[in-house]
Amino acid sequence: MNAGLWFRRGRLLILLPLRGQHGRCQIGNPLIPAVQIPRTTSTSTGPTPLYSNSLLADLSRIKTKIVQEAVAVDPALALDIMLDSLAGQLLHGAHSHQMALEVQAKTITTTVADELMATSDVRPVEEMMATRFASIPEEGRFEAIRELATDDKMALLAGLVAMTVDGTVFAGGSPGRRHYHFEQIARATGVDIAARWSAPIALFDKMRRAAMIDLLREEVGAPSAENCASIKKKADLAVNVSGRLPANWLPAPMKIGAFDQPERQPEDFDTDMEGDDGFDGSMDDEMADDEMA
């Protein structure tokens, strides 16, 4: 959104450009002094991450797809997830973007490059649903659903809830409260991520040379890392790194519990959603999407 004065839902909003943030804006109450939104920048000190922002986003989509698959075959869990999300928002004042379930009934994009799924047969839940419930008509849908057998209704519930479970991370974004909620769901499914997906060569092809060496040093040891550091071609290095890692190895973001403890943040600010206005938390999804663009 552009900086300036906006009148929305009976409130006057001020969008202020933040210095050094390339046009990103802060939404504020005109009665409350503007504050800068904390944001990790490329100039921050510390070790370079093993995985690029785009690769981290892809891994979060794969993990989400696997958890969605597990939820889709567990109707009882799907009901618990739905109740928890509704109760969190309606009883405890949680924001929809802080929940791992999108109750606005929009599907979550988990599409990644085919080469990153070369070692997995995980199917999108949408495909599973289209096969089993193709007979449900658009016209007369309510009546058709009421006539379904109980088992079919529960399977329909599980699939629909699964399609809205969201553990994805935006490229360049940081884990927030939604991801903590997602990890609770992932644990409840009991899914073994390593049994549903293993790292293909394409994963290592997308990593920096230095990151692959650092990964070997962490997972296998310094001697193995030093041995591979002399490999000239990145493609050959990727093959060697893949072969030296332990069986059932997973990238850290793919592990259950990877986002259990989001980074410390101000009370009214979620690092994965920049749309909180900081004074009553009622920013709608259209405004939030504008802020993330």
Image (spheres, rainbow, N blue to C red):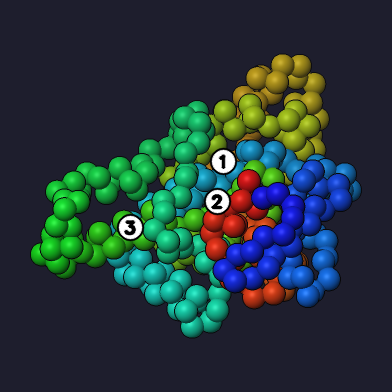
What's the residue at 64%, 64% (across, down)?
7
Q: Is residue 110 above or below residue 100?
A: above
Per the model, the C-alpha gap separating discs 2 and 3 is 18 Å
Which image quadrant is residue 98 in?
A: bottom right
Query: Circle 3 sits in a helix, a strand or a loop, which is it?
Result: helix
Query: Circle 2 sits in a helix, a strand or a loop, which is it?
Result: loop
The mark nearer the N terminus, 2 or 1, is: 1
**Residue type at the position of mark 2:** Thr
Q: Nearer the viewer, residue 253 or 149?
A: 149
Residue corresponding to mark 3: 160
As drawn, the label of residue 126 is none
Residue corresponding to mark 1: 58
Q: State the image coordinates of residue 91 (x, y, percent, origin top left).
A: 49, 83
Q: Nearer the viewer, residue 52 or 7?
A: 7
Per the model, the C-alpha gap separating discs 2 and 1 is 8 Å
**Residue type at the position of mark 1:** Asp
What's the residue at 18%, 46% (across, down)?
134
Q: Is residue 205 above or below residue 93?
A: above
Query: Mark 2, residues whose alpha carbon is within 10 Å: few (<14), some, or many (≥20)?
Result: many
Left or right of 153: which side holds 192? Answer: right
Residue 255 in sight from this viewpoint: no
The residue furthest bottom is 91
Left or right of 92: which side holds 106? Answer: left
**Residue type at the position of mark 3:** Leu
Q: State the image coordinates of residue 280 (x, y, percent, origin top left).
A: 64, 75
Left or right of 111: which side holds 122? Answer: left
